[in-house]
Amino acid sequence: MPARLVTVWRFRHFWLSLAGMDLRVRYRRSVLGIGWSVLHPVVMTAVFCVAFASWLGTGDWRTAAPFYLTGLAVWDVIKQSAVQGSLTFLRNEPYIRQSPLPLAVYTLRTSLGTATHFGIALGVAVIAAGVLHPSDHLTPLYAAWAVVPAAGLLAVFCWSATALVAVANVYFHDTQHLAEVGFGIGFFLTPIIYSKERLPERGLAWVADANPVVAFLDVIRDPILSGEPPSTVAFARAAGLTVVAAAAALAALARFERRLVFHL
Amino acid sequence: MPAEIDLQDVHLRFRVRSAMRVSLKEYLVRGLFRPSANPPVEIHALRGVTLRVEEGERLGVIGHNGAGKSTLLKVIAGVYPPTAGTRRVTGRVCSLFDLMVGFEMEASGWDNIRFRSYLQGETPRTIRNKVQQIAEFSELGRFLDVPLKYYSAGMLVRLAFSIASAAEPEVLLIDEALAAGDAAFRVKARERITELKQAARLMVLVSHDLNALPELCTSVAWMERGAIRMLGPCGEVIPAYRASTGRGGPVGAAA
């Protein structure tokens, strides 16, 4: 494992440049370019504010907008890590067939792209919270302290998800479709456009307990909106999930590192 | 440390399906009630290959299509791990095979030069001078600013060869990469290959050009059905192989 990590680092220019190219290609010839990463959650949030804010009890739009923006940022990065991540090894097949680089190199290519969009969306959410819901707590220093460690955990969790679904999709090609269906259903079972407190009212408290997305909403959204640091329990839960996911991903990569090329 | 390739009793087996799509029914009831309609097929691509190539040697590999020549190169390169036996390669490996594979078609020629150079282990510092040399060798000029999806096949070959051959290899693996581009470029490519061979400390070359091999190689391995049938000086192995093809040799299992 240490030797593979050294190789991943030695070839960092390769996957960093490919990740950069992916971002450039995605917005080539687009008028707004990477501005779409800003516009997309803003438009979705505007729709949610108009359609659902009063209905779902998320309150005044000035309060609701940062709530939606943060929820969408966390949801999208996890969803894209799984859905786009499932294609990672199929998309990089020509490189895998040519060069004996560790498979983690290709998962990092995918993860860097999704992490970049998450960073932009989260930045928009933090700015929106500061502008629309001004209070003493949301200073840049506080935002960094509250959000950066949790966002780091989320980045590792998302990389792990990418690695796991990427391996699974090579052996079972329906993984991507299953992930899309699962996330389509999961969106409504996750407190993104409604508050977590509404789940127990419907007898769905277990959803909040079982849903890993909720753990990351607790440590990213709540501090931004409430001004309170995440509780030790919430942070430990997110950290625990991240450790378990990362261990599973590393084990999967180690197990299939040498065999996967034959199944592409 | 001297460059060296040491394969000891290397076997390579893998399983593939004749049709890549596997139905849900196949997943759920496979093997329970009736034989699978699309059973995995085991390929025994390399069978007990023992090979030692030392510093300064130039090994040619010959054999019919499907004899396992390209698979052998990929095992040496580390792309395919042996399922039995041991592989030990000392030295920085440069592979000149599948030249056309692995281009980013949406990216420009300049970007692809960087990607491929980084894949060969270069860094921004080490490719600073090389990028311009590769561009000049390819003679693609302003087309390097254009995404590769607008290139002709010949232009792609030029670019691929220019990048791949710019490496400074210790262990050079070549898989029939000599026919690159149009006639004029092919002359340049041959000269470049000759320079590479001189620079490399060790070379393994897969080729069907039996006339050229004695000039390029110090020894030849004749592969048949995934195994080495004969290994020795060019003057002994190539005539034996010619005699075999005259009788119409077999076609093996793996590419």
Image (tube, grey):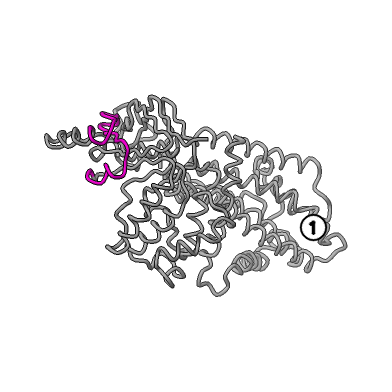
Amino acid type indicated by mark 1? Ala
For the residue pair B8 and A158, the one nearer the viewer reads as B8
For the residue pair B62 and B248, the one nearer the viewer reads as B62
Q: Which residue is mark 1?
A: A143
Q: Quadrant of the C terminus of chain B?
A: top left
Q: Is residue A163 above or below residue B229?
A: below
Instruction: Say whether residue B213 is magenta.
Output: yes
For the residue pair A83 and B175, the one nearer the viewer reads as B175
Find residue A242 and report its horizontal and vertical position in percent: 67, 41
Relative to A52, B239 lies left or right: left
Find residue B68 and report its horizontal and vertical position in percent: 30, 36
For the residue pair A258 and B206, the one nearer the viewer reads as B206
In the picture, residue A135 is in which quadrant? bottom right
Relative to B3, A17 lies left or right: right
Measuring 57% from the left and 42% from the top, which residue is drawn there? A7
As helix, strand or loop, the secondary structure at mark 1 comes to: helix
In the picture, residue A5 is in which quadrant? top right
Q: In this view, which residue lies farthest toward the bottom?
A: A31
Query: Which residues make up the magenta segment?
Result: B210-236
Measuring 55% from the left and 52% from the top, which residue is drawn there? A15
Relative to A238, B198 lies left or right: left
* Disc 1: host chain: A
Measuring 66% from the left and 61% from the top, which residue is drawn there? A121
Find residue B97 and report its horizontal and vertical position in percent: 37, 48
Instruction: Say whether residue A195 is magenta.
Output: no
Find residue A204 and report its horizontal and vertical position in percent: 66, 43
